[in-house]
Each structure stands twice: as structure tokens, then as C-alpha cells.
Image (cartoon, rainbow, N blue to C red):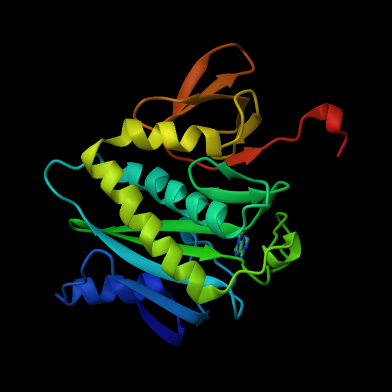
Amino acid sequence: MERIAQTGSTNADLLARLAGGERVGEGHWLVADRQIAGRGRLGRAWGDGLGNFMGSTVVHLGAGDPIAATLALMAGVALARTVQTLAPAVDFRLKWPNDVLVDGAKCSGILLERSGDAVVIGIGVNLVSAPELPDRATACFADKGAAIDRDRFADTLAVAMVDALWTWRQTGIESIVRAWLPLGHPVGTPLHVSEQAIDGLFDGLAPDGALRLRRDDGETMLIHAGDIELRRPVEEGK
Ligand code: ATP
């Protein structure tokens, strides 16, 4: 575990090291106290905060590994297990593929970036603070009654990641899918796929980890990547 006071982006740092020919071993984590140019998917920004977890690690893809895209689910399972261990009283759900939501508010983000046969996995978790954003609800664990020390979180996540990565490699994506399902939103949850502007109901995962969406017109389609928003059931009236 390598801890630094401040950087632009831990993902960018590990990608630069890999591009420079440095061998960054699996299991190594780069963790920053502050991250001033944190990144999300599709060029979006990730807001930091002192005391929150922001760190990145590397997976080196081997010949027999499942397809790299399924690492998104693997990382989600590792993160969820960490939350279960350190905040057992907090009721959270994974939103496919890997956001931790508490009461519908986003508490974490995961960004996977590939460089040759390496995949850099960056994880940001709001432990003590969450930025207020105009476009979505955010939350942090401290506000949900769970005081989690950043270093303890980092150590627990590193162990959970080794474990989930082992499962991904040795027993395949089907085992990760089985682990993911009880952590995720229940079957029947209304979802909105922003990129394709499609509404439907969550219908579980395909064996390869794709999301099964039962569209309002009755067809079931598979979503391999995309923005999924949870739609609140109408009867909740919120
Ligand atoms: P989603 O699937 O929820 O749309 P995403 O994959 O598009 O997420 P991520 O890459 O996980 O997004 O995170 C980037 C987005 O998260 C930003 O566009 C912003 O709306 C939101 N965000 C940025 N910082 C934080 C934070 N600290 N806590 C919660 N949400 C954040």
C-alpha cells in the first residue's frame, strides 16, 4: 500500500507508470489523501474530500482470464464486501455494475481504464464527506452512522479485492455474478438506461454479467455497458 498526500488522479498515475514501462504488481495500491483531478467514467469528474478513500490498483490480464469488462462486477463485489465488513448496519445496494447506493444516493464510483494487458481499477468512496452535486443525490458513510477510518478501509478493500480477483480468475464470472446478485438492486427494480434512453425493469444478470432489462414493451434486452439510473417506483411519490 502506497499512500500519498495529494495527486491529480491515482488512476492517471498508475497508467503513466505502466506507460513508462514500470512493473506495477497486482495487489499494489496507490492511495491519495486528496485527489484534485479525480476522474469518473466518460470524462466525468470525481469529487474528493479529506478522509474519503481514493485509490487505484492494477490487474494484469492473463490468457485464461474472463473478459476484462467483467472486472467491473468483480470490483463491485470487492467493494460491497468491504462495506459489509466495516459498515454492517448500513443498508446499501450495488447499482449495476458497481456503484454503492445508500437510500438511492451515490456513495462510491469505480473507473476501469485499460492499458495493453493491464487494467487500472480506481475506486472512490465517500467515507466522511460527499460533494453536493446538481445532477444526483450523494451520500457518505459518516452521515449514515458509520465512522470508517480511511486506512482501515484501504486495508480491508485490498484483501477483499484479492479474494474477488481470485474468484474471478479461478471460478469465472458466473461466480462473481452469483455473489453480485444478492448485493444488487432487487429483480423488478425500475431502471433507466440513459445512453439508449430505454426504460425497463431489472431482470437479473446474464451468466456473463450483462444486465437483463425487461423493457416496458415486454422485450428483454441485454445491456453490456451504459448508464443505468434507478427510477423511483411511482407509488413512493418522491
Ligand atoms: P452512474 O452509473 O451512477 O451514472 P457513472 O459511472 O457515470 O455513474 P462514475 O464514473 O462512477 O459515474 O462517477 C462520476 C459521476 O459521479 C460524476 O458525473 C458525478 O455526477 C458523480 N460524482 C462525482 N464525485 C462524486 C462523489 N464524491 N460522490 C458521489 N458522486 C460523485
Q: Is residue 79 at all visible to an observer of this figure?
A: yes
Picture quadrant of residue 111: bottom left
> Residue shown at 52%/40% (left/top)?
96
> Residue shown at 48%/42% (left/top)?
97
Vertical side of 182 occupied by 114: above or below: below
Percent coordinates x, y for residue 159 in the rendering = 37, 60
The C terminus lies in quadrant: top right
Locate ligand 1 by image quadrant. Answer: bottom right
Q: Nearer the viewer, residue 131 or 84?
A: 84
> Residue shown at 49%/76% (left/top)?
151
Q: Nearer the viewer, residue 96 or 19?
A: 96
Percent coordinates x, y for residue 209 in the rendering = 39, 33
The N terminus lies in quadrant: bottom left
Vertical side of 54 occupied by 165: above or below: above
> Residue shown at 51%/25% (left/top)?
204
Q: How many marks?
A: 0
Percent coordinates x, y for residue 199 in the rendering = 63, 27
Task: Please indicate whether residue 208 sits to the left or right of residue 128 in the image.
Answer: left
Vertical side of 61 occupied by 178: above or below: above
Task: Please indicate whether residue 159 sits to the left or right of residue 144 in the image.
Answer: left
Kindly give the residue lying farthest to the top in the view shown.
Answer: 218
Kindly give the residue lying farthest to the left in the view shown.
Answer: 63
Kindly give the residue lying farthest to the right in the view shown.
Answer: 237
Q: Nearer the viewer, residue 48 or 94?
A: 94
Task: Please indicate whether residue 64 sits to the left or right of residue 72 in the image.
Answer: left
Q: Is residue 38 at all visible to an observer of this figure?
A: no
Percent coordinates x, y for residue 102 in the rendering = 68, 50
Task: Please indicate whether residue 230 sits to the left or right of residue 42 in the image.
Answer: right
